[in-house]
Every structure is written in C-alpha cells, then in structure tokens.
Image (cartoon, rainbow, N blue to C red):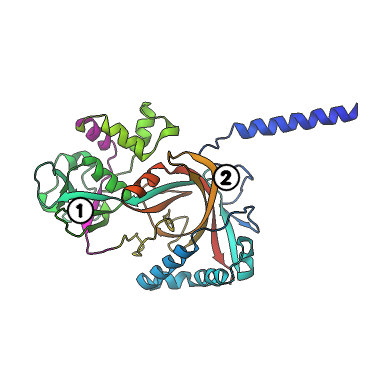
Amino acid sequence: MKKKIVTKIFVSLFFIFTMGCQNKPIHKGQQYKKKLIHDLTKIEKIDTKNKIINLESFLIQIKKIKTSSPRLYYKNQNIYKALENWLKKKSDINDFYKFRISLLQMKGVDNYGNIKISGYYTPIIKARKTQKDNFIYPIYSKPYNFQKHQFLPNRQEIYNGILDKKYILAYSNSLIDNFIMEIQGSAFIDYGNNQPLTFFSYSGNNGWPYTSIGQILINRGEIEKKNMSMQAIKKWCNTHTIKEIKKLFEENKSFVFFKETTKKQVYGASAVPLIEKTSVAVDNSIVKNGSVILLQIPLLNKYGIFINKYEMRLVIALDVGGAIKGQHFDIYEGIGEKASILAGFYNHYGYAWILNYKQ
C-alpha cells in the first residue's frame, strides 16, 4: 500500500513539474534550469558538451583591438592573455579556473539566465550624390547648428524636409533601406559605376526616444509576435504604400545621422573593426567595452526556426545600440544580404557568462 502511495506521489510531482515546464516558453531557445538571485552569479562548471566554435576569429578580434585601440587592449589584457594561454593548451571550457579565469553567469531577462539575443549587420545601400530618377530619399549628417542639449527635429519633421539640404550626404532609392541602415548603425554606400564602396558610420541621433516598429505591428495584430523578424517587416512594407510605410516609420521619433568615411572595414562604437559573429553590441551600463563573454547561442534553420540545438562562442563587447538595453546582446553578423537574413531572424534567447581574470 505504501509503495503505491509513494508511486502516486512521484507520478503527481513529475506531472506537475512537466506541466510547469510546458507552461514556460521555449520556442525561442529559453531554458529554465535554475533561478538566479544575483545580477552576476559565479559558476564553477558549465553543463555542456559543445565546444567553442570560433576560436580562430576570436584571436583575430583580439589582434584588431590591440592594433586599433591599444588603450582598450591594455584595460583588458589580463583576460585576453589568459585566454590565449588557455587556447595554446587546447583546454576544455571547464578548465578556465586553471588559468585564473572565472565565469560569472548573467541573470537574463527573467532571472533564469535567458539573455535576449538579436543580430545586426552592415547593409550595402545604393545611393547617389545628387537627387535624380528614383534616388530621392536623403541620408543625413548630424546638424551642427543646434545647441548641445537641444532636441533635434523628430523623424516626421525630418521626413517633411525641416533640415537644410547642406546636411544631405546622399540620396538612396529606398526609404526602407534608409530605415534599416539606421537600425544597423552603419552601411556601405554603392554609388554605382563600379566605384569602390564608401563606409557611412554612425554620427549620432536626434535625441528622441526609440520606438520599435516591430512592436507596433505586433500590437496592431498585423504580425504575430512569434513570427516577428526583419524579414516579416520587409514583407509588410512590400504590401503597403510608401505613404503607409512612412506613417509607420514616423511612429519611431528617433532618427540616426551618419558621416562619410574612408574606412574599408566596419567599425563599432569602440573604434575597433568588427569580426562577424565574434563582436557584440551591449548595454555599457551592464557590460563594459572590451569584456569577453562566453555565449551559448540557439541555432536556427533556414526559416529562422529554433532547432533545439546551441553553439558556444567567445565574443567581445565592442559596440552599442539605441535598442540594446539591459540583458541583451546584439551579435554582429557581417556584411550584405546573407548576413541580413540571419540578423533579421535572430530574436531569441541564450545563456551568457562574463569572463574575468582573478588577480
């Protein structure tokens, strides 16, 4: 009789636990192994059989930091050198402690370690120096005739032509491409006639708060939350008029300005060339520039669907973004159309551990 009662209790507990897990979302890569109390929790061991897959590009990224920003390299050289020594020994992830490297797990957006992961890339935008044919959408430099703490015009006012034409760097043939360029923070400009691509870098914004147009479309019921991606937004734009698109974009009053450069590589906010899938944009109030993060990233299929597998990467915090706040990493995916597809799909969750060197 006692045996039957114990069995029933066990089955009941198992059922409750199983149903509890089912009630938590997991389709975006979320995991619920252990609730974390602190913002950063020291971890002795990581339960994974996956190996870090980007060791070569990680070393290249460190070299880029050393040559482009010696000051940033110097501030973080202890952890960089410790990891280089760890690599030379071809050691396991759980051997970090042997090299005086400690792992601090981030609590995530829900205190279960689930860090929001998105992607960004560098688009290639077709443009011309002067307005002609269908090249009619201005790309602006930051106006300088405003006081330091004065708000610049909002997006609607800028679209309506409030800024002097002397601030126009070029004209593109797509308002959508311009908006994507703002979200990504930079772009290579293709002036045509087989001219070399020109890099336009971020030069500031107008100071107005950022509003996600993706969230607006979700709230309207025009795109389901589970299907939201840059591809979904582009698809929406392709089925609406330029007037409707403009009206949607104007709900985001924030506007980004650019500057033309002679750079041949993509640079982040830390003035360091970015290596694809190895550099990330972060919230600097939580993660400092140059920090090394071990990131467990959910893998997606060609349709952007999570396939219940993960990969491990060492990434470095080298960029920032207006929409990157809190427990959120934005992974740099590279240049052009292929990178845009993966960046557009990523709106998922992974685990993150900040690597520190113990003096």
**Compared with residue 60, is residue 300 higher up or lower down, i.e. above or below?**
above
Q: Residue at x 13, y 41 (%)?
A: 134
How many marks the image carries: the answer is 2
Q: Nearer the viewer, mark 1 or mark 2?
A: 1
Instruction: Locate the C terminus by quadrant.
Output: bottom right
Which residue lies under the disc numbered 2?
111
Q: Residues within 10 Å of mark 1 (few under 14, many from 20)?
A: some
For the record, the magenta segment spans 243-264
Q: What's the mark number on residue 190?
A: 1
Residue 254, image x and y in percent?
28, 44
Looking at the picture, does residue 42 appear above or below residue 253? below
Label 2 sits on what residue type?
A: Asn
Q: Is residue 73 depicted above or below 267 in this figure?
A: below
Q: Quarter-wise, where is residue 320 in the image?
A: bottom left
Q: Is residue 249 magenta?
A: yes
Tell me what residue is drawn at x 27 percent, y 48 percent: 181
Q: Is residue 142 visible?
A: no
Q: Please name the residue shown 19% across and 50% down the image.
A: 140
Is 165 magenta? The answer is no
Q: Is residue 33 left or right of residue 58?
A: right
First-in-chain label (1 vs 2): 2
Spot occupied by residue 248 in the image (x, y as percentages of width and height): 27, 33
Seen from the viewer's position, the closer of residues 25 and 109 is: 25
For the residue labelled by badge 1, is the local secondary structure a helix, a strand or a loop?
A: strand
Graded by Cα atoms within 10 Å as few (under 14), some (14 to 19) or many (20 or more), the crowding at tag 2 reads some
Q: Residue at x 38, y 26 (%)?
A: 221
Q: Are marks 1 and 2 in contact (CB under 8 Å)?
A: no
Q: Amino acid at mark 1?
A: Asp
Residue furthest toward the right?
Answer: 1
Task: Give the quarter of the figure containing the N terminus.
Answer: top right
